[in-house]
Image (cartoon, helix red, strand yellow):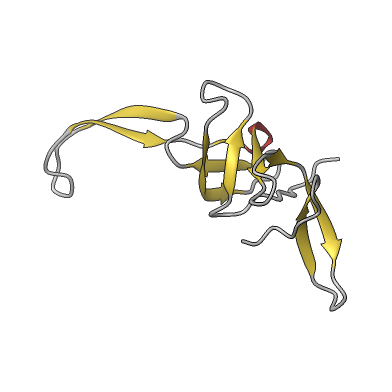
Amino acid sequence: MITDKCLIRKNDKVKIIAGKDKGKISNVLKVIRKKNNNRVLVENINMVKHHVKPNAKNRQGGIIAKETSICSSNVMLMCNKCMSPVRIKIQILEDGNKTRICGKCSEIIEN
């Protein structure tokens, strides 16, 4: 069964656990939800270079570096209290709202 559930949100602090940038910590710029796989765009991670021609909008051409997305399974959320990468659990509060909590210290993770 394929699900589109992604517990990572924009502006979360994450640690890269796989790939060429393994071990780096950065912020999530964008979450891309798709049917088959969820991807995240992380600040200064998975940088690629593009060759751009000069045009009316971008007068100066050249080589620019920008981020590309990585699979959400390659990142783990960083807990602010225990300062380590953790798994995320969902807890239902008394008023019926769902919230994310740390799997290690059970601290509520604010967005």
Judged left or right of residue 100, residue 62 is: left
The vertical placement of 44 against 57, above or below, is above
Q: Which of 105 and 4 is in front in this view?
A: 105
- Rendered location of residue 98, percent (x, y): 80, 66
Residue at 36% in and 36% down: 66
- Rendered location of residue 32, percent (x, y): 58, 47
Q: In which quarter of the image is the C terminus?
A: bottom right
- Rendered location of residue 15, percent (x, y): 59, 36
Q: Which of 38 and 77 is in front in this view?
A: 77
- Residue 71, image quadrant: top right
Q: How many labels does the image show?
A: 0
Residue lying at the far top in this picture: please name it.
20
Residue lying at the far front in this picture: please name it.
82
Q: Which of 14 and 38 is in front in this view?
A: 14
The vertical placement of 74 against 86, above or below, is above
Judged left or right of residue 62, residue 41 is: right
Residue at 45% in and 42% down: 43
Residue at 57% in and 25% down: 22
Judged left or right of residue 33, residue 44 is: left
Residue at 88% in and 75% down: 94
- Residue 39, image quadrant: top right
Judged left or right of residue 1, residue 19 is: left
Q: Quadrant of the N terminus?
A: top right
